[in-house]
Image: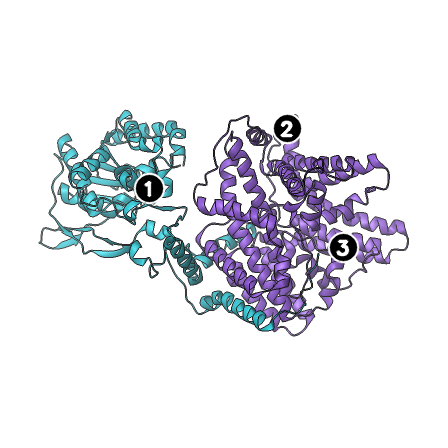
Amino acid sequence: MIFASLLFLFGFLPLFLAVYHALPWVGARNLFLTLASFLFYAWSIPKYVPLMLLSTVIDWFVALRIDGARGPRARKRWLVASMVSNLALLGWFKYANLGVDVLRDITGAPLADWQRIALPVGISFYTFQSMSYTIDVYRGEVKPVRSFLDLLCYVSMFPQLVAGPIVRYHDVQAQIRKRVHAVEPFARGVVYLLIGLAKKVLIADNAALLVDVTYVTANPGLLDGWLATLAFAIQIYFDFSGYSDMAIGLGLMVGFRFPSNFLSPYRSASITEFWRRWHVSLSTWLRDYLYVPLGGNRFGTARTYCNLAATMLLGGLWHGAAYNFVLWGAYQGGWLVIERLAGKRALWGFLPHPLRIVATMVVVLGGWVLFKATSLGAIGGIGKGMLGMNGLGALPIATGHSFEAWCAVVAGLAIAWTMPRTEALAARFTTRIVWWAIAVGLLALGQLASRQHSPFIYFQF
Amino acid sequence: MIIDPYDPLPRPRAILLIVGFCVAIAIGPVCWFAGARVHTRATPPAPAWETRAVLDGDYTKALEKHIVESSPVTLALRGAYRDAWMGLGLLDTGNAVLGRGGQLFFWYTLQAPAAFARDRAARRALLAGYRARCEALGVRLVLVPVPDTASVLPELLPEGFVLPESRRRLYADLAGEAREAGIETVDLLEAMRAWRRARPEETLYQARDTHWTLTACQRAAELVAQRLTGLGWLDAIPRASLRAQPAQERPGLGDLAEQTGLAPDGAFGSVIRDRMRWIAVFVRDANGGERPLATDEPDAAIAVAGDSFADIGFVPALCGHLGRLVDASGVLPAGGPRSGLEATLMRIERGELRVRVIVWEAIERSWAEDWWHR
């Protein structure tokens, strides 16, 4: 089930909220939240529900063992057991197909009888969350939870289950046991939800109409190449940040506070800054659980660059088991290394601030080509077009809803560059903001009822 | 950054928002449990419980579609949204496009037919196969391709819109393919254009439905009857005692109107409703009694095979013009150009029909769709 669907908004959500708020104490609420989360998750592909359960059981058990282990070696052994089991799950379901493809490309012979494995929704997110819990217990940053239900509630919590933000256990540990349900967070949650819905439906889904027509064209020109990539930049940002807003809003409605995931990333003046603002929960996860354990910047300049590049490469691979995501990670890592070499500043740092933002955006767009185009041929085609090697080209034309598509791109860019973030709007809560949230929410609902909508992009990761 | 959601805010405003939100989203379950459901042509049936489908998530997907399309909330939201866009003059449903004079078109019938050239070889092989099967059965086959609205009424296309060249050529191309395969073909496009020029006041296509009017299918039937008579294919087929009667006019919501999603009872309800009129044919028996023409007429020597245009008015009209019984068991709406013909040929091969002539109705647009590899 996805948030931006009529069944969720007019079926699951009202029934869930009615029962949840009717329950008298937090234990019952946690139990109901967990059951509802499993129903929410099972709605996609029920046969993968046991996977999430298995991952949680392992990490709950391992965390208790780590806590009870006598020496550091025993603690480490249990941590390794958790890492191996989680990464094996993730590796099998996410990367087995890639492995077979690579083997085929190397040997030139496809693997006979290989049935492609469907990716369980949200596996990348809940595995990372679950792993972060055992690592934090190992590091002594959190105490292991005795109640299995508490951990299951944390891992399966539907508002952030399938596409983040990646919430760490210590962020919500206290809230699972005790949280206050009040008018203020609920009302702010509604604003978050409506704005998030509008971001996804009105902007991301409409901008997508300009992307798809160009990215299936073999040789787009200069104009359509750049504009379609810009439209994709708008699509992916509003799609994912819309989802995150809805997740944060739903969390507030049940008394949880989730961290912000996007801090106006397209206002960054360098790629380093971009990664502090884009998908913050993943960036910090990779920093704390990958970059720092690899040595971070503690072992000299060369090692720091290697760690940075390796972290981004793996970050790219986390997004998907395909060459283009590896290239995308390498591209981002490469830019981060270059900026480090330049003294932690962008190569275009000498420009006035607005131009630095534009220059950063251009580099980010180059990355989105790698992210969006699914084959090396397609990357080459779009790349050539953007370099003007296929001529000037023409404006991308959507196969329908062109007006909405262009409005979405223009409005998306204006919002990304000039508007306050959703949390600022929810915090202010003025009459005008509330009315705007209601208006765009209603418009989004109308569009949702009128057209086919794609699921969130990050559901596939 | 984590905001403090407990920061004070104007409570009356917050409570109003929460109450409004909760009441709004509660409409869905309230309608559902109160039994308020809607059923339109777009409503899929509730899926059957099947373990594999459940485990793979196909069941829940189908169930979600069923629930959403059965909900009055969906219909109300869709109607209000599209009424608003229509009011702004910006209605673009992605499926139906508003042309001049309120004429609606399926969007895809205005696009270049991408699959047409790709499937040419498969189609040629199938056409040759159909001709050979008919010859082996001693059956004569006549193809009646029905032109799309845009081919006959290009002057009603949206302002400034030009049909792609390959779409403009489609009718001539498909008729050419059929003739190359040795299949007798009735060119309705030229005839309809000529009728249009001679009597511009006559309506040949519904404005809010993709199908033709009674006038057009009567004229098409007349033309087919003339061709069959001219070819001498009717000579050995006995006449039947038939009575044709224009059926009563009734209001209807066309398939294109449904695609607009405009609310039938909304501000633009009158824009999407059509008045549709068809014909009914009665067969007289030896005792002077009458019965309506049946779909399945095993004694008929003529069969119509085809798609929805044949289903809407063409069979009784043809019956009336031929003065002979016509079997319509091979008329399968939304079945594409092949299903009806193959069903008819199979019935003849099994001895269930004693047909000597098959009138094969095929819609111009579906000729260019992905039917030839199935």
Q: Residues within 10 Å of mark 3 (few under 14, many from 20)?
A: many
**Which one is in front, B200 or B7?**
B7
Q: Which chain is cyan?
A: B
Chain painted in purple in the figure: A
Residue located beneath label 1 in the image: B159
Which secondary structure lies at badge 3?
helix
Query: What numbered label is drawn on residue B326?
Result: none
Q: Which residue is mark 3?
A: A133
- x and y percent of residue B40 in the render? 37, 57
Between the residue at mark 2 and the residue at mark 1, the CA separation in whole angstroms equals 51 Å
Pointer 2 with pointer 1, Cβ within 8 A: no
Q: Chain of mark 1?
A: B
Where A396 falls versus B96 (above or below)? above
Q: Which mark is residue A105?
A: 2
Residue density around tag 1, few if under 14, some if 14–19, many if 20 or more, within 10 Å = few
Give x and y (percent) for residue A184: 63, 68
- Counting from the top left corner in percent of width and height, residue B54 is at 54, 53
Q: Nearer the viewer, residue B290 or B150?
A: B150
- How is the rendered protein coloured? by chain
Q: Residue furthest bottom?
A: A24
Asked whether the residues under marks 2 and 1 belong to the same chain, the reply is: no
Q: Is residue B270 above or below residue B351?
A: below
Q: What chain does mark 3 sit on?
A: A
